[in-house]
Structure formats: structure tokens, C-alpha cells
């Protein structure tokens, strides 16, 4: 989740091997995307609902995708049912509304029944009924044991949709034994930072986890408080450095 | 030591059978065949190719029959010039359409997200296009030839 123009779509495109990162590499389940055994069975993606040949019927569009990964025809009918496009499956997708195109794109992502799904801005341009449908679908897909990546710049949307939001947890700590605490926090996957007035800020772990760690290792804590951050604050803080286009409030004189 | 453990994903029933071998060219070929036969432009261009090739043969041969043969007359040429001149051009149009339509519609992004190996995708596309146009051109060539010869045989200009 980040702001417009920062790189959500580009990140997804890099995962799919459509863009090459300037530096570094992207792997999916430990392999570059192009080396996956069967791409559709591992990752299903909806990047752009309009990235289809409009002259082809919805059914044939899904069929030609399924055939590339040796996915049986029966699965095409199944996903058409899942997204509710039975009535228009034989129609050319040129005439589809944005909502219908989104459904077609989601059907394509589901063809391989993958463990990982990526939806780029899936609710953009949808009516309330469509938004509700996508939200319920994403939740049910996740409940089946899939990982669903959803990119969005709409915070309320994410708060409504996600069961778990991975927001960097923080806790403010005071201890006379900060070096040992730093070591155990780091070992547990967190990070300890020095703040004002001898306060330490633990990142990557919750206050509960920091407390447990301190107890397990017999470290005296004088003070431990969870620093609660609302999703909106966390979002603003995390993206503050990366705003490219910011409207200025007020009129300059 | 406690760490933030992500709950293990429960095993779920698979809706799609696992791939018995790594999907590659055979699947990509089936897919490209579906693509080429599921858009109208294929049928229009192939129909145009057949009509132009055969019509040219008919006109050329009928003209020869009514006006007589000129120097350097070839019965085969009279039947097949249309195929070589215009029919071929229309095949070129179809060839361009097969690939450019993927880029102009954005379909190529979807295609590459399911066949991430470029070589496999483009090879399949080229093979299917070549096979389809070769088959159709063979049929129209023979039809144009025999129609032309039938017309020429009225004055015994046909190839013996």
C-alpha cells in the first residue's frame, strides 16, 4: 500500500518479469518468475483488466490462457461461474463494462488455482456493489489458505478488506541493559533504535513480544509501552518521503 | 524465544490437477491456435485472400480467352499471379495483425504473465501463423490454378 505514482504497479510488473529492476532481482517461491514450473499454478495476477483482446469472447480468452499451462477446459467453466460471467461468456469482451472486465481479469488469475494472487487496484472504478463483491471474494480466497496481495492507495478500502495488515509494529522501551536487549530483539527479527531521553524504540516486534523476550532473557525493563499507530498515521509516515505529487494547501502570496 | 509466527497455511483441495510435465511449447501452440481462430480479423483476411487470388485468376484467364495470348504467355502465371501479388500481401497483413493486436490491446502483458518464457510464446505464435497461412494458401492456390485452367481450356491455352 502506498501513494499514487510510487511504484505499486511497477513492483507487481517486476514480480511478473514484465519490467526488469534497475538493480536487484525478484523471485517467486525462490525462483525468478520465468523459471517457475507452471506460472499460472503459482501466481495469478490481475494488473490491468483491460489488457485483453476485445475481439475475443470471454470464454476463448480464458481458454487460450488455460491452454498455455495445460489447465483443463473444465476449469475455464468453473472460474466463469466463480466470477458470475456465465451469461456473457460467449460475448466479445470489447463491450464489457469495467466491472465485467475486472471479473474477467479475476477469472483469469484464478485459472491455475494458485497459492499467490496479486490484484492491482482491484476496486478502482467499480460501483459499491462491485467493490463489495471483490472484497468478499478476496476474503474468501484468503480464507481458503491463499496469499492475496492487494495494492491500493485507498486506506479505508484496505482497513475494510484485510484480515491482517502488516504494519511495522513498534514498542517504546526503557532498560538499563540496552545492549543485551538489542541483541535479543535483533535475533528475533526486530530492530532496536535509540530515541530521546534514553528511550528505545523496537521496530518489527510488538510490545508484548518485546516484554516476553526481556522476561525470557532476564533483562530488566523500567518501562515498556506499545506505540499504537493508526493505519492512516503509519501510512503517512511510511510514505512521507516518497510523495512526488503533493497538493499544497493554502494560497501563496 | 517468541517470534511473530505467520500461521501455517492449511492444506486446501486443489481445483486444478498439477502439471505432469512443465508446460511449454505444446500448450502454447494450442493456446495460439485458440487465439487465431477466436478473432474475426483472421476470417476476414483469409476470406479476402481467397477471393482476391481466385478472382484474379478468373479475370486474367477470361481476358486471355477473349483477347488471345500475348508474347511470353504462361498458363500457370495467368492462374497464380493474383496469389503471388495480392494474396501474399494479405497474408502479410494477417501476420502483422496476429502480433500487433496483442500489443495494441495490452493482451501481451496477460500472455507473458502466463507464459513468462518469451521464446516459447513467440515461437508458438510464429508456428501457428505459418501453419494456418500455409494451409489456406495451398488450398486457394490449387483452387485458383484449376479454375484458371478450366477457363483457359475453352481455347486450349491451358497447361497440357
Image (cartoon, grey):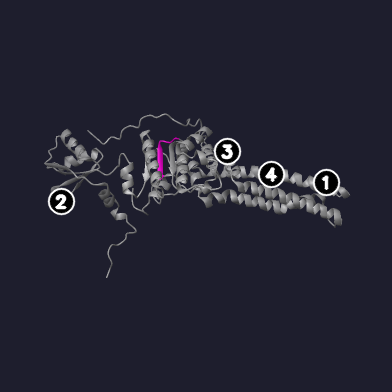
Q: What element carries label 1?
A: helix
Dot 3 surroundings within 10 Å: few (below 14), some, or many (20 or more)? many
Residue B49: image location, x then y, percent: 69, 49
Q: Magenta stretch: give its range.
A: A113-119
Q: Name the residue under label 2.
A: A196
User: Residue visible at 28% across and 68% down?
Assistant: A252
Q: In this view, does A155 lie to the left or right of A182?
A: right
* Lower sequence index among marks 3 and 1: 3
Percent of width and height locating residue A6:
36, 53
Position of the C terminus of chain B, as image quadrant, is top right
Spatial separation of the CA atoms under disc 4 and disc 3: 18 Å
N-terminal of the pair, mark 4 or mark 3, is: 3
Q: How far apart are marks 4 and 1 (CA)?
A: 21 Å
Q: Mark 4 lies on which chain?
A: B
3 and 1 marks on the same chain: yes
Check if residue A37 falls in the magenta segment: no
Query: Which residue position is annotated with label 4?
Result: B136
State the separation of the CA atoms marked 3 and 1. Answer: 39 Å
Q: How far apart are marks 3 and 2 (CA)?
A: 65 Å
Amino acid at each position: 500500500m502506498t501513494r499514487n505514482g510510487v511504484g505499486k504497479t511497477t513492483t507487481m510488473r517486476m514480480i511478473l518479469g514484465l519490467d526488469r529492476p534497475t538493480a536487484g532481482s525478484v523471485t517467486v517461491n525462490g525462483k525468478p518468475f520465468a523459471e517457475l514450473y507452471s506460472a499460472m499454478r503459482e501466481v495469478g495476477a490481475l494488473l490491468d483488466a483491460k489488457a485483453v483482446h476485445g475481439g475475443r469472447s470471454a470464454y476463448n480468452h480464458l481458454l487460450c490462457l488455460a491452454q498455455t499451462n495445460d489447465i483443463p477446459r473444465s476449469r475455464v467453466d468453473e472460474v466463469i461461474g466463480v466470477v458470475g460471467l456465465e451469461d456473457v461468456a460467449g460475448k466479445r469482451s470489447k463491450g464489457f463494462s469495467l466491472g465485467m472486465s475486472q471479473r474477467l481479469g479475476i477469472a483469469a488469475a484464478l485459472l491455475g488455482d494458485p497459492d499467490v494472487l496479486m490484484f492491482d487496484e482491484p476496486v478502482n472504478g467499480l460501483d459499491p456493489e462491485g467493490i463489495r463483491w471483490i472484497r468478499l471474494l478476496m476474503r474468501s480466497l484468503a480464507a481458503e489458505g491463499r496469499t492475496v496481495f492487494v495494492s491500493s492507495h485507498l486506506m479505508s478500502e484496505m482497513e475494510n478488506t484485510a484480515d491482517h495488515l502488516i504494519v511495522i509494529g513498534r514498542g517504546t522501551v526503557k532498560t538499563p541493559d540496552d545492549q543485551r536487549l538489542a541483541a535479543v530483539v535483533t535475533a528475533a527479527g526486530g530492530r532496536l533504535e535509540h530515541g530521546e531521553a534514553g528511550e528505545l524504540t523496537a521496530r518489527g516486534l510488538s510490545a508484548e513480544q518485546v516484554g516476553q523476550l526481556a522476561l525470557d532473557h532476564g533483562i530488566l525493563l523500567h518501562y515498556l509501552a506499545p506505540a499504537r499507530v493508526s493505519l492512516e498515521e503509519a501510512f503517512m509516515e511510511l510514505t512521507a518521503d516518497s510523495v512526488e505529487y503533493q497538493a499544497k494547501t493554502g494560497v501563496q502570496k | 524465544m517468541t517470534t511473530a509466527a505467520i500461521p501455517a497455511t492449511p492444506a486446501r483441495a486443489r481445483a486444478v490437477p498439477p502439471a505432469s510435465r512443465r508446460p511449454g511449447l505444446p500448450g502454447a501452440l494450442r493456446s495460439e491456435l485458440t487465439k487465431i481462430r477466436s478473432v474475426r480479423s483472421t476470417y476476414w483476411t483469409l476470406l479476402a485472400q481467397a477471393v482476391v487470388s481466385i478472382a484474379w485468376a478468373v479475370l486474367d484467364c477470361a481476358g486471355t480467352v477473349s483477347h488471345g495470348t500475348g508474347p511470353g504467355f504462361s498458363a500457370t502465371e495467368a492462374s497464380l499471379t493474383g496469389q503471388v501479388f495480392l494474396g501474399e500481401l494479405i497474408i502479410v497483413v494477417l501476420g502483422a495483425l496476429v502480433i500487433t493486436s496483442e500489443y495494441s490491446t495490452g493482451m501481451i502483458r496477460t500472455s507473458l504473465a502466463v507464459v513468462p518464457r518469451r521464446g516459447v510464446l513467440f515461437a508458438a505464435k510464429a508456428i501457428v501463423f505459418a501453419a494456418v497461412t500455409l494451409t489456406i494458401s495451398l488450398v486457394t492456390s490449387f483452387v485458383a490454378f484449376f479454375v484458371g485452367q478450366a477457363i483457359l481450356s475453352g481455347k486450349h491455352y491451358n497447361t497440357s
